[in-house]
Image: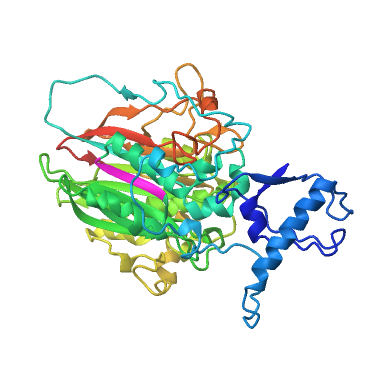
């Protein structure tokens, strides 16, 4: 049953002159903006092509609606041109769209909830306010405690915060959620409170909406965080962001990565990545790299996600590599993000194992065009390291609109000499990474970070397996079974459709070796 409110009846143009044959059906509705009480109920199982039989009460109700519409119409400007009907929602929010945000003030849930607003109607999974167990998300210590305090401890958070415009463009994904929990101001307040409650020194966000950067996310800058942001390419209105405390870290460098690569059919999507090189202000003076990304969602395109990860790892390899003349090494690396990949996927297996067989996922794209080898390295980086030369962006062949107007010209003769390094059935990487989370708990139950037809893990935090970076504790992830108590996200407690991941690390003054 589809419930229509009085406010909808006021603004929807219901054509009733020939009720059997001329019924205007507006696009699929959400009740994000609904107020007041339900004025009547429309049976969605009724055929739109057949005549509709109304009771006397329904006829009187429709007559009142027509009367209100005629009265309102009589005051309209008859000389004003008639605007054409919009066939679909634009991906770009505007000032009149609820997803634009406007000015935002941090309010509690109670302050945001006024008595004259529409009251939530819960779906089948959120039939009542959610009761979360007290031990649902607790901090779990990892490894043995040491008395040596020479290391520097810091906390990292990764969170897909759910861009509001994406929520509103895909309302069918949230039909089991309370519409109050889908309002941006309600969600934003919960996101703000949750992030601050975790108290991260660094946090990486995915699906950060561009129009909310100043109205909402700038609140974190007011608290002393510095931010870098990379918008998705094309017409996408969200992107990835990294925030860090300016009182704790100095930023040495940062770069962005675009996964759209001209001339590469497998790399034709608008996803992006972002990474930053940070140096603690205190001891030890050991720089490290934090990277984040949001890979393609399409469940059928593992090949695209794997290609995106290959480009990202090549850029991390270039960005985190150091050579002091005596020895070469990688800075400690922390890689976070929404990979849209379950633990059994080729993407996660590549990160875990360092090498996978992927002949069925390679497609027809020729990786020599962007000179990224099957070892997830730029060919120019590989060759320059043998000569002791640092590789700048203008020496590599991938495209990035932040740094170049077009991709560099092909060096076909040089690449042909190393053609065996491309387009094989295997993909490897030289970075030694391990996951903060086990993905499967000791009792055999799978962890979960979001609901995609079922509760599953798609969000991850990886870090370098080296002596200079140690995992101290992690924010516990619930199992898929435990997540059933949540209903569907966003809910009364969590402002996104993903759960946040967080970990505390200890940085020591020793670099990892190759």
Q: Point out residue 132 in the picture as x, y percentages from the top left corner.
A: 45, 24
Rendering colour mode: rainbow
**Can you give x and y, in whole percent of width and height, for residue 95 in the image?**
46, 65
> Of 480 and 113, which appears nearest the observer?
113
Nearest the viewer among 201 and 390 is 201
Can the viewer see residue 382? no
In the image, taking residue 6 as reference, residue 385 lies left or right, namely: left
Left or right, 189 with respect to 154, comes to right
Which of 195/147 is in front?
195
Report the side of 304 relative to 112 (left or right): right
Q: Closer to the camera, 411 or 73? A: 73
Total number of numbered discs in the rendering? 0
Q: Name the outermost residue toward the bottom.
A: 79
In the image, residue 140 above or below residue 193:
above
Q: Is residue 510 above or below residue 87?
A: above
Query: Which residue is found at the position 20% from the left and 53% from the top?
Result: 251
Q: Quadrant of the N terminus?
A: top right
Q: Residue furthest top?
A: 443
Q: Position of residue 271 (x, y in %)?
A: 47, 56
Q: Residue at x 41, y 44 (%)?
A: 112
Place of residue 298 in the rendered image (x, y in percent of width and height, measured from the top left): 58, 49
Q: Main secondary structure of the magenta part?
A: strand
Q: Residue at x 82, y 63 (%)?
A: 22
- Regarding residue 113, the answer to whether it shows in the image is yes
> Which residue is at 75% across, 51% downward?
61
Residue 190 occupies quadrant: top left
Placement of the C terminus among the 4 image quadrants: top left
Q: Is residue 153 magenta?
A: no
Q: Give the residues drawn in magenta, as a range.
A: 201-206
């Amino acid at each position: 049953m589809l419930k229509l409110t009085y406010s909808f009846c006021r603004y929807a143009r219901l054509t009733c002159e020939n009720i059997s044959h001329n019924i205007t059906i507006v696009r699929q509705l959400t009740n994000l903006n609904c107020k007041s009480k339900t004025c009547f109920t429309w049976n969605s199982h009724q055929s739109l092509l057949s005549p509709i039989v109304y009771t006397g009460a329904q006829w009187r109700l429709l007559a009142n609606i027509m009367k209100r519409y005629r009265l309102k119409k009589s005051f309209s400007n008859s000389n004003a041109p008639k605007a054409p009907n919009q066939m679909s929602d634009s991906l770009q929010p505007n000032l009149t769209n609820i997803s634009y945000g406007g000015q935002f003030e941090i309010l509690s849930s109670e302050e945001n909830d006024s008595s004259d607003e529409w009251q939530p109607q819960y779906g089948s999974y959120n039939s009542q306010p959610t009761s979360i167990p007290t031990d649902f998300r607790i901090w779990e210590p990892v490894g043995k405690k040491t008395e040596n305090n020479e290391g520097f401890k810091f906390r990292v958070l990764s969170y897909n915060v759910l861009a509001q415009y994406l929520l509103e463009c895909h309302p069918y994904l949230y039909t089991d959620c309370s519409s109050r929990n889908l309002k941006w101001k309600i969600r934003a307040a919960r996101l703000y409170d949750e992030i601050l409650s975790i108290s991260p020194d660094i946090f990486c966000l995915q699906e950060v909406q561009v129009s909310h950067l100043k109205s909402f996310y700038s609140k974190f800058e007011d608290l002393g965080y510095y931010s870098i942001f990379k918008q998705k390419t094309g017409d996408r209105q969200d992107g990835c962001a990294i925030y860090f405390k300016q009182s704790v870290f100095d930023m040495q460098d940062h770069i962005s990565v675009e996964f759209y690569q001209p001339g590469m059919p497998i790399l034709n999507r608008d996803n992006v990545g972002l990474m930053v090189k940070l140096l603690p202000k205190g001891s030890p003076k050991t720089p490290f790299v934090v990277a984040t990304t949001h890979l393609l969602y399409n469940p059928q395109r593992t090949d695209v996600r794997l290609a995106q990860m290959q480009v990202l790892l090549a850029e991390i390899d270039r960005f985190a590599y150091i050579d002091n003349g005596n020895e070469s090494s990688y800075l400690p690396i922390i890689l976070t993000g929404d990979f849209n990949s379950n633990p059994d996927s080729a993407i996660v297996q590549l990160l875990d194992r360092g090498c996978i067989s992927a002949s069925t996922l390679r497609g027809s794209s020729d990786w020599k065009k962007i000179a990224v080898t099957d070892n997830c390295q730029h060919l120019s980086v590989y060759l320059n390291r043998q000569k002791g030369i640092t590789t700048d962006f203008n020496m590599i062949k991938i495209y990035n609109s932040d740094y170049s107007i077009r991709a560099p010209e092909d060096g076909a003769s040089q690449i042909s000499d190393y053609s065996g390094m491309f387009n094989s059935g295997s993909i490897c990487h030289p970075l030694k990474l391990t996951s903060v989370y086990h993905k499967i708990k000791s009792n055999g139950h799978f962890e979960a970070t979001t609901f995609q037809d079922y509760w599953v893990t798609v969000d991850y935090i990886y870090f370098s397996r080296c002596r200079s970076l140690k995992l101290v504790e992690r924010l516990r992830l619930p199992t898929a079974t435990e997540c059933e108590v949540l209903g569907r996200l966003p809910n009364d407690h969590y402002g996104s459709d993903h759960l946040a991941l967080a970990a505390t690390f200890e940085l020591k003054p020793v670099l990892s070796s190759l």
